[in-house]
Image: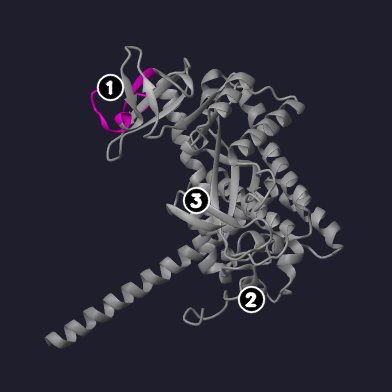
């Protein structure tokens, strides 16, 4: 056989192998998309959204048609191959005013009530399940209350919700809507459940009292949710509350300590000043940079060194400081009012604070929260609350139903790119390209 013929056959065989591998990958991605759609539909039924939310909105809209697919479309436009709700209506052949009608069907009080009730319906059975188990099982199902705020970019003077806010993610002032979110992290991230949400209003121009800031919002949301648990006969232990340095307010920390006999753990700033028991003054920058501290190690937090200090602050009084040094990370410290809780437990609780970032990342990037073109305050609340519900559905799907085999990113990606091959009657998805030629599909 001449070399040219041998090389041509080898090239043909290699091309055939690549084609077969591409076909196998395509079939695998299609199966994963179908699995994600079925898991998503099951999560919607498990969380009670089809029975409750659809019926309530149908009554408001006086509509007899099934709205579950359209509501899911409002939650997850990327799942339908679209980025905005307007594009979704154009692709699916829906009325272009459908997003405004659906999102504005309920007043903002009803949207927030729906979100709070959904959080309670998810958390109360989990608590009653764990309360009947052993102490070791209950320790794995501990709850951590996490509060944080984030800015959703919006330009232009839209209603009275859009203002200028400092964004910690982008380190600059942005024009947009500032939302304050309270979530409960179950265990070390088994489930993240949003339990309350609020939109901060910009301070009015001219004379008038300033609007409620995020410190007051966090206190009001925490008090309201814990009172709701008491009304349901659920006696929770003292809550562990975690927040970033923006919530390090002495009044809020005292309120949590005196009202609930609990701890508010926050990250310290470099400008804080403390006095150690031996009389030495230290600044927060010293705690973040110096290395001459009594370092310890614990098997509960492997690979992490920490130092526990007791100090006095002119603002907070007696405090407990935990200096943390992790591999390949900057040294930092967290603080709370004086407590006997062990340092490893405080560090594990602080690690759960990052779980709220998954919510904001899902809202901003995966669910495209900023793509909202409605023109009423109720519709804005509906837009953001629906996305929060969608975030909970994604968490529940990936962590509970799929048991970590599919992540939120994989679910979004597979359904976004292969929705034409997915068959789901409830979500109004039909396998449009199932019988088409592979190249045409």
Structural distance between the alpha carbons of marks 2 and 1: 59 Å
State the image quarter where residue 16 is shown. bottom left
For the residues bearing labels 2 and 3, Cβ distance under 8 angstroms: no
Q: CA distance from mark 2 to mark 3?
A: 36 Å
Asked whether disc 1 touches disc 3, contact meaning CB atoms under 8 Å apart, the reply is: no
Which label belongs to residue 166? 3
Residue identified by numbered label 2:
91
Give the answer, above or below, for where 21 lies relative to 44: below
Q: Is residue 139 left or right of residue 159?
A: left
Which residue occupies the foreground of this view, 334 or 286?
A: 286
- Foreground mark, 2 or 3, reads 3
Q: Residue at x 44, y 35 (%)?
A: 351
Q: Please tell me which of labels 2 and 3 falls first in the chain.
A: 2
Q: What is the quadrant of residue 21 in the picture?
A: bottom left
Q: How many marks?
A: 3
- Of the image marks 1 and 3, the number of the one nearer the N terminus: 3
Q: Which mark is residue 295?
A: 1
């Amino acid at each position: 056989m001449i070399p040219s013929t041998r090389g041509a056959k080898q090239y043909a065989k290699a091309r055939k192998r690549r084609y077969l591998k591409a076909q196998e990958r395509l079939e695998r991605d299609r199966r994963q998309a179908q699995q994600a759609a079925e898991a998503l539909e099951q999560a919607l039924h498990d969380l009670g959204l089809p029975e409750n939310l659809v019926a309530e909105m149908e009554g408001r809209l006086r509509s007899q048609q099934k709205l579950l697919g359209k509501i899911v479309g409002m939650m997850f436009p990327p799942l339908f191959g679209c980025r905005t709700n307007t594009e979704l209506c154009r692709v699916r052949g829906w009325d272009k005013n459908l997003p405004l009608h659906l999102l504005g069907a309920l007043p903002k009080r009803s949207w927030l009530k729906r979100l709070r009730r959904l959080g309670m319906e998810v958390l109360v059975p989990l608590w009653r399940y764990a309360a009947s188990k052993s102490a070791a099982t209950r320790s794995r199902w501990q709850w951590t209350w996490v509060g944080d705020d984030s800015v959703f970019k919006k330009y232009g003077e839209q209603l009275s919700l859009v203002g200028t806010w400092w964004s910690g993610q982008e380190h600059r002032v942005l024009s947009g809507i500032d939302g304050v979110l309270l979530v409960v992290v179950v265990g070390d991230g088994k489930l993240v459940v949003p339990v309350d949400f609020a939109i901060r209003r910009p301070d009015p121009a001219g004379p008038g009292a300033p609007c409620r800031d995020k410190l007051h919002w966090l206190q009001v949301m925490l008090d309201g949710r814990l009172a709701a648990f008491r009304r349901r006969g659920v006696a929770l232990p003292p809550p562990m509350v975690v927040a970033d340095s923006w919530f390090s307010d002495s009044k809020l920390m005292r309120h949590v300590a005196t009202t609930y006999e609990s701890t508010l753990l926050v990250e310290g700033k470099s400008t804080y000043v403390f006095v150690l028991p031996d009389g030495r003054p230290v600044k927060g920058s010293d705690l973040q940079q110096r290395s001459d501290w009594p370092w310890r190690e614990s098997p509960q937090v492997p690979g992490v060194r920490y130092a526990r200090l007791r100090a006095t602050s002119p603002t907070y009084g007696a405090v407990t400081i935990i200096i943390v040094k992790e591999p390949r990370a900057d040294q930092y410290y967290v603080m709370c009012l004086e407590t006997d809780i062990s340092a490893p437990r405080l560090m594990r609780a602080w690690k759960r604070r990052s779980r709220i970032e998954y919510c904001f990342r899902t809202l901003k990037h995966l669910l495209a929260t900023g793509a909202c073109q409605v023109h009423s305050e109720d519709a804005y609340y509906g837009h953001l609350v629906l996305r929060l519900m969608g975030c909970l559905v994604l968490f529940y799907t990936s962590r509970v139903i799929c048991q970590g085999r599919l992540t939120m990113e994989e679910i979004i990606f597979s359904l976004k790119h292969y929705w034409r091959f997915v068959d789901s009657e409830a979500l109004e998805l039909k396998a449009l390209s199932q019988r088409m030629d592979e190249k045409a599909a």
